[in-house]
Amino acid sequence: MAVNVVRNAFTIDVEDYFQVSAFAPHIPRSEWPDRECRVERNVDCILAMLDEHDTKATFFTLGWVAERYPNLVRSIVDNGHEVASHGYGHERASDQTPENFFSDINLAKLLLEDITGVKVSGYRAPSFSIGEKNLWAFECLERAGYRYSSSVYPIRHDHYGMPDAPRHAHQIGQLLEIPPTTLRLLSRNWPASGGGYFRLMPYKLSSWMIRRVNEIDQLPAVFYFHPWEVDPGQPRIAGISAKTRFRHYLNLHRMELRLRCLLKDFSWGRMDELFLEKP
């Protein structure tokens, strides 16, 4: 049973290991259909884990994945979780024109809704790729009918980040932007919301940061990870840099146990139920 009284958002970015942005120079999109897909087994593992802890979550799902594995997406909904959009083809928003970006997010939304029969409210940009240079993306999201986004990470990072952006949920036009959680400490925002940081840092430090955000800001935290992060047996990609290898493969064998601790130590829920007013 969770010991923390604040209910936080538990989110999963549904993509397969070969679709990671850092692997793009090594794995052409044309090869995706020929790669061993492991996303189904990994999502099944996550669904079982969530069921054991009586927890509902939000799954930001690629249209590419949903199109090929529609039963996976239906299973997410049937188990009481929220299906949201991760775009169609895992293209960074910052690498697209406004026209191409709108086509991508609109296709993904319509596809997910057609498969599940449920309205899709949320979107998360691949690699948190909305920042100062492509704020036009929010108008596209609003036009496509999304109600919220979780696409701006208010940190400094070599591939993404907007460190001066608000740290908590805020309105941008009619859209609600809900950033991944950071801890404000020593005049800097520190990542406290999952992904590679959660695998890199000791669990006690990660949980301390989330608890500090709950206690000091008195607001929910937004945690995220990927299905491939619970899969230490995934194929290794040849030719990648030492930095990419370190970031992607570090502590994969510890991830499932850490997630189970997190589910036990905190209270969790879906993004839409925590942040959106009911229509």
Image: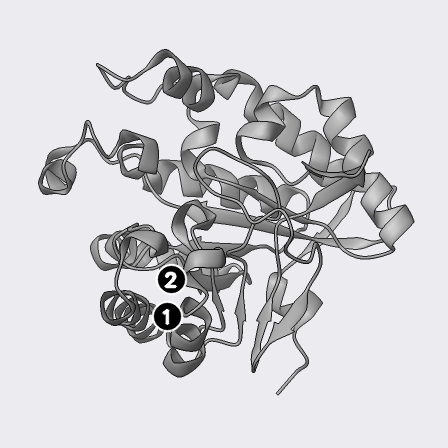
Task: Place residue 62 in its image quadrant.
Answer: bottom left
Residue 116: numbered disc: 1
223 lies left or right of 247: right
The reply to whether residue 157 is in sight is yes
Please provide percent x and percent y for residue 69: 26, 53
What's the residue type where badge 1 is placed? Thr
Nearer to me, 54 or 13: 13
Query: Crowdedness of circle 1 by 10 Å Cα count: few (<14), some, many (20+)?
Result: some
Please provide percent x and percent y for residue 155: 61, 42
Q: Which residue is pictured at 70% across the width and 43% down the height?
A: 182
Please provide percent x and percent y for residue 264: 75, 37
Residue 41: numbered disc: none
Please provide percent x and percent y for residue 212: 85, 40
Give the labeled residue for mark 2: 74
Q: Vertical placement of 104 versus 94: above or below?
A: below
Q: Which residue is pictured at 76% across the width and 41% down the height?
A: 183
Nearer to me, 222 or 241: 241
Whole-number angstrom distance, CA of label 2 to CA of label 1: 6 Å
Task: Place residue 171 in its image quadrant.
Answer: bottom right
Nearer to me, 248 or 157: 157
Quadrant (top left/top right/bottom left/bottom right) for the N terminus: top right
What's the residue type where badge 2 is placed? Arg
Nearer to me, 136 or 120: 136
Q: Earlier in the sequence, mark 2 or mark 1?
A: 2
The reply to whether residue 119 is in sight is no
Identify the secondary structure beneath mark 1.
Answer: helix
